Image (cartoon, coloured by chain):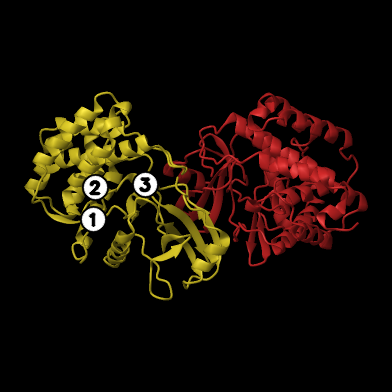
Chain colours: A yellow, B red
């Protein structure tokens, strides 16, 4: 869960008074999310989410994220829409931190993933990529190759504390990724972190995508590979090929994949598994920093990475070119 | 914060389907409370609180608590009202735990206590005591004298780890309390745990009292002494006499205190300080049991206990008999 910053009632009232939202009826910290402090804000106008941006979100990136959510919502993506204060701004300061109020999205994120979830996710991801095509801003993916090298340098010396031999395995992997990483796949706005807890469903349909704070400009198929890693593996570490096929076919039904994108999937999936392995490893080694957060097991993604290394072609994901 | 039990979306939907609440639109764990798992449940009918009862709440006491909230709400106390399922029951099972849905109360609990909060609290407490007078059930206070003896026995051996000399100080204190504890003050339903995070305000008025899971039958003035300890001390450990006077005068404006109740206040306040000191001490020594809970400092109540020991009469709380 994540409530790093405790917002008191006086501050909350003063903050919300800058908006046309009526009286604050309740403000309750939400025990979900990891990066930011999130509150469910209930006012006379209904439910909203109040987010205070903490540590990993860079101040200079916030206007990008806010503008992106506004753009996507305008283009039909069910994502949080930033609420503007009376002065027209959507980004303000609360308890010394940048903060924003966004709309509340109905739906629940699925705990037990079934193939239909993956199909719905695939369609929603392709729609997101389509809506992102007309977004005028761009942001480099700071958690791609260069970022991986930097993160790995910061935690490699202690990697073997987590698993013996991990440092050398990651070292070799990063060299392979740096040498083979694609250069000319279709690019655009990607979500970058579309794990199940960021995707709400009502019945069998996606009703909302949240948490755009890793969004950036990168290969669209990389986003799909993140979803492969986040949605299609079973607890025992095996890939569920049915889920993978539903995900990819759901995506293709909205945005066709080029042959070179399909061919690159195993490598992209290695890269995205490496990215989550690395960030979790660094978090793990740095320990919890006082906040009430469950640390996530980095080795889950080592097993996924090894799986993708063994995949020789798209049929490994149950699909055909 | 408290989310001990993770409720998945399928289970939530199946659970809520037993009520006339429409579709589940959202279920978010709330990062508040310590004893139970609390979720903000949003359905097509609005916001509700879903509580899963954990460890410290005894199963056999739940019908008492549910009936009490129903009674108090009917008698005008702004407290959560249990929502009945279609089969007429308000207490069901979710994820293997007893669970109930209660109404959502507007308001925020005050982080920075001002005297007017204490006055409003005093009035609300007296109204609660009045509404409780017609409640037909009773429940012994298992955190009064006998409970203190039992708790102290379970953690006394390690008390000095928290503060040198604590064991012998608490031993002497408990003997005094056992010898001098009142026997014939007015009794009735008490809340027993009316700390600021259990009292919601809208503007200057109390808009809701929550968390009735320590409610029981005991001296009404003991409840007032809990509030004295919970609301009227400053961070530096000193009693704010203005707040104490507002609390007690607010209470008296609704329900007059008898001279013997006023005379007993210093002793009752020693007892309630002792009670919170003890439960915090035991929690502290047992450590967090895996849940994401901030442990509370037991010594805060040692300082309060010592203060009350020094009070020679009601004027110590800024009031007159």
Res B205 seen here: yes
Residue at position x 21%, y 35% in the image:
A241
Where is residue A81 shown, x and y percent of the image?
36, 64
A81 horizontally vs A42: left or right: left
Identity of the residue drawn at 75% across and 51% down: B228
Q: Which residue is mark 1?
A: A216
Between A44 and A69, the one lying in front of the other is A69
Q: Nearer the viewer, residue A201 or A192?
A: A192
Q: Which element carries disc 3, helix, strand or loop?
A: helix
Give the percent coordinates (x, y) of residue B41: 51, 52
Q: Which mark is nearer the camera, 1 or 2?
A: 2
Q: What residue is disc 2 on?
A: A143
Instruction: Mark 2 vs mark 3: give the one in front.
Output: 2
The residue labelled by disc 3 is A197
Contact, CB < 8 Å: mark 1 with mark 2?
yes
Whether residues under marks 2 and 3 lie with C-beta atoms below 8 angstroms apart, the answer is: no
Quick one: label 1 or label 2, which is nearer the N terminus? 2
Could you say which quadrant of the image residue A83 lies in? Answer: bottom left
Kindly indicate whether the residues beneath marks 2 and 3 are on one polypeptide chain: yes
Q: How far apart in space, not on screen, are marks 1 and 3 (Cα)?
A: 19 Å
Q: Residues within 10 Å of mark 2 (few under 14, many from 20)?
A: some
Residues B233 and A314: in front is B233
Chain at tag 3: A
Secondary structure under badge 2? loop
Callouts 1 and 3 close, C-beta under 8 Å? no
Q: Position of residue B191 (x, y in %)?
A: 73, 48
Q: Earlier in the sequence, mark 2 or mark 3?
A: 2
Depth order, front residue of A296/A78: A296
């Amino acid at each position: 869960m994540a409530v790093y910053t405790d917002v008191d009632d006086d501050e909350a009232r003063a903050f919300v008074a800058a908006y046309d939202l009526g009286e604050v009826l309740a403000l309750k910290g939400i025990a979900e999310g990891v990066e930011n402090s999130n509150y469910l804000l209930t006012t006379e106008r209904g439910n909203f989410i109040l987010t205070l941006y903490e540590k990993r979100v860079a101040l200079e990136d916030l206007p990008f994220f806010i503008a992106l959510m506004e753009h996507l919502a305008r283009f039909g993506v069910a994502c949080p829409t930033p609420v503007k204060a009376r002065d027209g701004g959507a980004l303000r300061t609360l308890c010394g931190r940048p903060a924003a109020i966004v709309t509340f999205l109905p739906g629940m994120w699925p705990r037990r993933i079934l193939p239909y979830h993956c199909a719905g996710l695939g369609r929603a991801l392709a729609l997101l990529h389509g809506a992102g095509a007309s977004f005028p801003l761009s942001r480099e993916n700071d958690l791609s190759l260069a970022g991986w090298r930097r993160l790995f340098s910061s935690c490699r010396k202690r990697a073997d504390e987590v698993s013996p031999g991990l440092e050398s395995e990651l070292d070799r992997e990063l060299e392979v990724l740096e040498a083979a990483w694609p250069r000319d796949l279709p690019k655009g706005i990607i979500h970058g972190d579309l794990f199940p807890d960021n995707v709400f469903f009502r019945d069998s349909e996606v009703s909302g995508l949240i948490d755009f704070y890793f969004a950036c400009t990168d290969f669209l198929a990389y986003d799909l590979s993140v979803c492969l890693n986040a949605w299609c593996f079973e607890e025992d570490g095996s890939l569920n090929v049915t889920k993978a096929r539903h995900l990819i076919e759901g995506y293709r039904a909205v945005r066709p994949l080029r042959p070179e994108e399909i061919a690159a999937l195993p490598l992209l999936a290695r890269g995205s598994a490496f990215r989550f392995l690395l960030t979790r490893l660094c978090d793990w080694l740095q320990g919890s920093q006082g906040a009430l957060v469950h640390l996530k097991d980095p080795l889950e993604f080592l097993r996924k990475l090894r799986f993708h290394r063994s995949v020789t072609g798209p049929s490994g994901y149950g699909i055909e070119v």
